Amino acid sequence: LMRKILVSACLSGQPVRYNGTAKSVRHPALDRWRAEGRLVFVCPELSAGFSVPRSPAEIAGGCSGEAVLDGAACIVTDGGEDVTDLFIAGARKALALALDCNCAFAILTDGSPSCGSSYIYDGSFSGRVHPGAGVTTALLRRNGIEVFHHTAIDALQRRLSAA
Ligand code: SF4
């Protein structure tokens, strides 16, 4: 059975980001995997019921998605609204889809409070980033799904040829 790959919807050109844009990524491997029917697209934030556009949100206090899952940090909008529960709901929906579709891997948009995997914003809404993962990435990893950021598609290719 071919293991599938969960992919952030905004990477496929869907304009679902908070500001109504996409973050399209082109890579020959992505085209091939798509043709093979291996890609499963999800936007955790839309799955949770957010609309487009929506207020930007960051994980507060320089914390990570792991801390959010543990109830030790929250996610807030730039207007100060606590949206933690919705973000966790989106992460759970993404995980359920990944498990349903037999995804062992994911390629997610870096920097997002949901999908980030190597860096996220620090909660100050000043453009500062720090190493860390978003809440969807953290939940996927806790469930054994290997998450690659959107500029690490070569690394996933190598991982798959070694698998
Ligand atoms: Fe893209 Fe993930 Fe943000 Fe949705 S939640 S717009 S898939 S980065």
Image: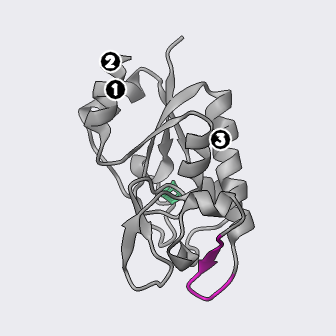
In the rendering, which numbered label is found on residue 95? 3
**In the image: residue 62, left or right of residue 30:** right
Could you tell me which secondary element the residue under label 3 belongs to?
Answer: helix
Asked if the residues shown at circle 3 and circle 2 are in contact, with their CB atoms under 8 angstroms apart, the answer is no
Q: Please give the name of the residue rendered at 73% of the width and 56% of the height, measured from the top-left corner.
A: 89
Magenta stretch encompasses residue 78: yes
Q: Which residues are magenta?
A: 73-81
Q: Quadrant of the C terminus?
A: top left
Seen in the picture, residue 24 relative to 18 is either above or below; the reply is above
> Where residue 11 sits: x, y (%)?
40, 50
Q: Nearer the viewer, mark 3 or mark 1?
A: 1
- Out of 22 and 129, give the one closest to the viewer: 129
What's under tag 2, amino acid-wise?
Ala
Residue at the spot of label 1: 159
Q: Please give the name of the residue rendered at 41% of the width and 29% of the height, measured from the top-left corner.
A: 34
Real-space CA distance between mark 3 and mark 2, rounded to the nearest whole angstrom: 24 Å
In the rendering, which numbered label is found on residue 109? none
Residue at the spot of label 2: 162
> Where residue 116 sits: x, y (%)?
45, 57
> Where residue 75 sits: x, y (%)?
62, 72
- Out of 51 and 84, give the one closest to the viewer: 84
Real-space CA distance between mark 3 and mark 1, rounded to the nearest whole angstrom: 21 Å
Residue 77 in view = yes
Residue 13 in view = no
- Mark nearer the N terminus (3 vs 1): 3
Could you tell me which secondary element the residue under label 1 belongs to?
Answer: helix
- Out of 103 and 132, give the one closest to the viewer: 132
Seen in the picture, residue 162 relative to 89 is either above or below; the reply is above
Real-space CA distance between mark 1 and mark 2, rounded to the nearest whole angstrom: 5 Å
> Where residue 88 sits: x, y (%)?
69, 58
